[in-house]
């Protein structure tokens, strides 16, 4: 959520920043300003009348001591009380409407976020494999280890059973990533996969992406689409001493997304599914430290991809594609041989104080109490990482060579499909 004080003090700079996303956001900003003015006017009037009430109350008490007729005083008091009640209700409604309008505004993009309309390629790293043969896709390479046909009987389309050695590879990936992140100061966390509406609202997924979220209406709970939701809420409505910052967490969780509107080749196999596992980084930092923390998270994502031997590129996401909470976002896209192009594998976002304000998370220092900043980044999106490992490690005979980094955590050095893929 944007700072209302910032909007009041410099509305035109906020308007210009929001216009980079969408010029139409100016109308929403005007609504916020109008509701704020209504709230301030009603509040000031109510406070002024309360002061008059106190004076009248004192005059009434003095008149009674003098045994004077107080009927007129009492009538004035009743009239003032009704006015104060009306103005207080008017202020409450205006404040509620202002907050709703304010909540609908996205974060203002950082000056260095890509202007668009296309993402900005920052760099390409690693050698694209020259296979010398027609590349197989991940379903062909995994064979019976990815069973979407039987999963469809159980759950419908875009689900999968992972079996055999591929399960061992997933567990090795997760264990390796969590161990690595722990040495870098991230505390491992396994969070709940169900969250209340406040957590989705606080992280900016509501009301922005409700079409992608699974809900359990009878319980007023939602299935999380990323552990970012749960990790951000670890310090919901708390004041964190500045000396404890930065706070860094590495969450491992299942993730659930409707993927509404997705179609085409992405729905084949496990590239775009309704359920997947992910290791997510999340940081709480002082505002002045968030740009450096963003670059640090990106560097960790790149280090992970490099140790896995995956060719990739880094892109600075265009302002029109940032999502509501991010001020700046990087994606790391891995090369997928069967598609002959780079595809998103990880992302990391600096959400500045946007989520912290919505969740009322603050820090206390010698400078007083203020909102802190939050950042998030994918360490390992398991399904897509498996795809990248399978396809980039494929050999002409159909086997797959896996990175040595995973071996100490139980992954085999090589995979071989044992049967035809589940999808024909």
Image (cartoon, rainbow, N blue to C red):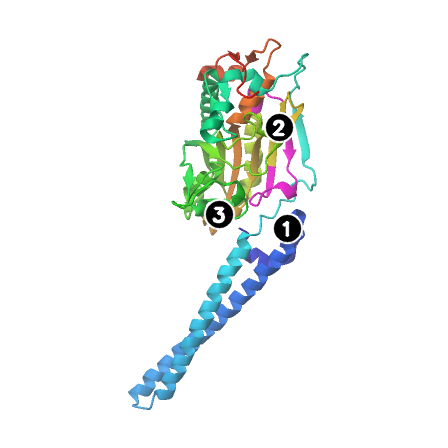
- Left of 23 or right of it: where is 345? left
Residue at the far top in the pictured view: 397
Residue 379 horizontal/vertical position (percent)? 52, 29
The residue lying at 49 percent from left, 32 percent from top is 280
Q: How many C-alpha atoms fall within 10 Å of the one at disc 3: few (<14), some, or many (≥20)?
A: some
Residue 153 horizontal/vertical position (percent)? 47, 27
Q: Earlier in the sequence, mark 3 or mark 2?
A: 3
- Residue of label 2: 265
Q: For residue 390, what is the image quadrant?
A: top right
Q: From the viewer's perspective, is the residue at label 1 or at label 3 nearer?
A: 3
Query: Foreground: 82 or 166?
Result: 166
- For the residues labelled 2 and 1, say whether their Cβ atoms are less than 8 Å apart: no
The residue lying at 60 percent from left, 8 percent from top is 397
Residue 112 in sight in this render: no
Residue 221 horizontal/vertical position (percent)? 41, 43
Q: Which residues are magenta?
A: 304-329
> Which element type, helix, strand or loop, lies under badge 2?
helix
Residue 234 horizontal/vertical position (percent)? 42, 41
Image: 107 above or below 147:
below
In whole angstroms, how far apart are the C-alphas of marks 3 and 2?
32 Å
Residue at the far front in the pictured view: 153
Tag of residue 201: 3
Tag of residue 18: 1
Image: 286 above or below 122:
below
């Amino acid at each position: 959520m944007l700072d209302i004080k910032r909007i009041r003090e410099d509305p035109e700079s906020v308007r210009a920043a929001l216009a980079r996303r969408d010029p139409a956001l100016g109308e929403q900003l005007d609504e916020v300003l109008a509701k704020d003015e209504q709230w301030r006017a009603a509040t000031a009037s109510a406070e002024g009348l309360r002061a008059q009430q106190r004076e009248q109350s004192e005059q009434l008490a003095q008149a009674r001591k003098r045994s004077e007729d107080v009927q007129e005083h009492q009538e004035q008091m009743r009239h003032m009380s009704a006015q104060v009640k009306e103005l207080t209700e008017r202020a409450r409604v205006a404040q509620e409407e202002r907050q709703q309008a304010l909540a609908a505004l996205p974060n203002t993009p950082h000056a260095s976020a890509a202007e668009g309309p296309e993402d900005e390629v920052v760099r390409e790293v690693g050698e694209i494999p020259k296979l010398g043969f027609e590349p197989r896709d991940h379903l062909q390479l995994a064979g019976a280890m990815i069973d979407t046909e039987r999963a469809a009987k159980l759950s419908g389309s875009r689900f999968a059973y992972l079996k055999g050695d591929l399960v061992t590879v997933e567990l090795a990936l997760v264990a390796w990533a969590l161990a690595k992140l722990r040495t870098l100061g991230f505390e491992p966390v396994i969070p709940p996969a169900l969250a209340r509406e406040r957590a989705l609202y606080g992280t900016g997924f509501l009301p922005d992406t409700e079409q992608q979220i699974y809900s359990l209406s009878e319980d007023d709970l939602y299935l999380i689409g990323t552990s970012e939701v749960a990790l951000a809420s670890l310090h919901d409505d708390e004041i964190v001493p500045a000396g404890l910052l930065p706070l860094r967490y590495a969450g491992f969780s299942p993730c659930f997304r409707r993927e509404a509107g997705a179609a085409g080749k992405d729905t084949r196999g496990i590239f775009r599914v309704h359920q997947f596992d992910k290791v997510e980084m999340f940081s709480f930092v002082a505002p002045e430290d968030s740009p450096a923390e963003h670059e640090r998270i990106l560097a960790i994502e790149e280090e992970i991809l490099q140790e896995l031997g995956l060719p990739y590129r880094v892109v600075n996401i265009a302002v029109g594609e940032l999502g509501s909470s991010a001020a700046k976002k990087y994606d790391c896209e891995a090369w997928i041989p069967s598609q002959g192009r780079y595809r998103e594998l990880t992302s990391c976002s600096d959400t500045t104080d946007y989520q912290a304000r919505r969740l009322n998370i603050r820090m206390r220092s010698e400078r007083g109490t203020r909102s802190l900043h939050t950042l998030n980044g994918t360490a390992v999106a398991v399904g897509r990482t498996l795809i990248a490992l399978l396809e980039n490690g494929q050999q002409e005979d159909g086997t797959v060579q896996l990175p040595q980094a995973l071996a100490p955590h139980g992954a085999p050095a090589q995979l071989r499909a044992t049967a035809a893929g589940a999808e024909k």
